[in-house]
Image: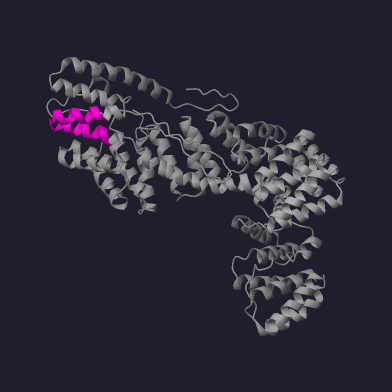
Amino acid sequence: MVPNDAHFCTLRLYAVASLRYDIDSTCIATFPMMSDDLSQSTHPQFASSERMAYDTAGMKLKIAQSLILALAWVLAGVLGGTGFLIPLRAADESARQSHEKVAPPGSRGNAQIGEAEQLFRQAADLIDKDRPGAAIPLLRRALELAPNEGRIHHYLGYALMKSSQLPAAQKEFEIALKLEPGDVYSEYFLAQTLDMQGFREQALALYERILSSGNVIYDTYQRLGQAYARKKEYDKAVAMLQQALQQTPWDGSLHTQLGAIYRKMGREEEAKQEFAEGERIKNVDEASIQKMLQLTEALRLKDSDRVKALRADLMNQSGKDPDLMTWLGVLLGRGGLYPEALEPLEKAMDAGPCTYETCYNLGLTLARLGRDQDAEAPLRKAVELHPHSYEANLVLSIAYVNAGRNQEAIERLQVAHRAHPDNLRVALLLGQQYLQGWYLQQAIETFREALKLQPDNVDTRYLLLEAYQNDKAYEKALQVAQETVKLHPEEARAHFEVGHQLANLGHYQEARPYFEEAIHLDASMAPARIWLADAQLRNGENEAALENYEKVRNEDPGSLDAARGMARTLFRMRRYPEALADVQNSIAAHPEDAELHLILAQIQTRLGNSLEAAQANAAFEKLHAAELAKQNDQRPRTYVAGSHTPTS
């Protein structure tokens, strides 16, 4: 028996532009012991210590969808955030021109109407003209009139910071955050002010808070990269600087910083590539960079006509420049214009040689367009150039998952997980791939480590429980289920799993209250109703069992579990003609299910139809042999990195 709700349902992740994930299940059925009320006999091939298990694929898919939606958030940070979703950090002059150095228009609350508003506008104009000292007295007068206006405190903090009055600036930003908690602009400039005063740990905590908010502004990635490098957390520093390069790919200093970190990590070849890239970028003309900045602004404003015109200009003027074409593709993709991003990236690759940035972003764009097969080659090249890249390895792993290439997906996910061991969702994706390949001990180890990151996470708990169950470690699975009920008594599946594991251990009647509570919390949970019916049938409560099986079948006419349960119950009740008609209809719907043929053979025997019974038994033997062969493929094994060959 495969003790995984009788089915091991694999998940296929389809990385598409909308980051939706479709799920495909391939479930391998197993059989319970089956006896009638006369002899309590069982077929010899089912006379074992194995306990009843039923198909809970519907519930598992629902829970899997929840996991995948959660994974989508973290993968959005890779499939979108590192390449396309982050606001561009402009140079100081360009930021002042767009009124974004302090805060973008409309991002803060409305100031008090009247004199305070006039003073505020005058001060903001002075700040735009790079005269922060002259703005300070105006802002102080405005605060006398409107002391609880957060944006006035924010602008005063900025003016004080630019005038090197750092403690005073810090105080104003802190007041602004008390008035407007979570404002990323005040957090950003407070972090800068703290950093300039030497309070680096406090500054780092604020930059990390901005990162976790998902609204990453200005050069936060670069500052995080520098902070992590100072702490010698080089993997984190590399990840941040790579993301900073996606914001401003023409910033040669970022390549130089990245090269220096690679050198400290002993990755000399990658260091040389970054230093060379930094030198090459120095030759890019300023006019093209200005057009890139204009394109960034047009994308932010969703000015499609302006975007189209700037794209055409850059394609015509710089179509043979691989660096500019790469940057153009990155910016367009970041704006969600994936078809428009593809052509410049392909031009960049054709112009050659394919740099990491070109290969990675081309592969990313193709993945966004749903062209995983085409995305593989550039992504593999990106990984070849930067073997330790978190982003490239993760995106490539998804392409492999989509293609059903489990072992290759694991290889790439292992690299991504090593780069970010604290990323819960990547850990779960890696563990899920171990689970799918039946690398059970590695799945268990991965889920246990993931549980340390977030002990109350139900997705992690259900996956760990599933891994224990597949490994027939029912006591451990029960312990996880019981802990989950204590943490999440509102979770129907948590109650179901306690009952499920008790039943796996043979405690069917002890399991009944948990199935009943699961149904109370979620009346649509078919697996709980099926298992409750099984327990009732074992206890001789035939009518109650039949009623529950019928409820499931009424909700889902194609339910194999309900079909099996109905046939068994009618057989147990000696309603043989009715059982015969029912099981024949079920076999028409599920012709490959061996257990239904076994039940048919037993019914035909009771009816005295020996020839028909022999035919049904022969069909059972054939189908059961095939299913046993499939089950033999689902044996615990160990994944050996680099070999693509599992060992038993």
3 lies above or below 158 = above
Left or right of 411, for residue 188: right
- Please name the colour scheme applied to the rendered image: one colour
Asked if the stretch drawn in magenta spans residue 584, the answer is yes
Asked if the stretch drawn in magenta spans residue 645, the answer is no
Which residue appears at 14% of the width and 28% of the height?
577
Left or right of 647, for residue 528: left
Which residue appears at 65% of the width and 77% of the height?
111
Count of number-bearing discs:
0
Q: Using the rendered image of the protein, determine whether residue 534 is visible from the camera's viewpoint.
A: yes
Q: Main secondary structure of the magenta part?
A: helix
Relative image position of residue 81 (x, y in whole percent): 64, 49
Relative image position of residue 311 (x, y in whole percent): 75, 48
| Quadrant assignment for the N terminus | top left
Q: Quadrant of residue 186?
A: bottom right
Which residue appears at 34% of the width and 43% of the height?
497
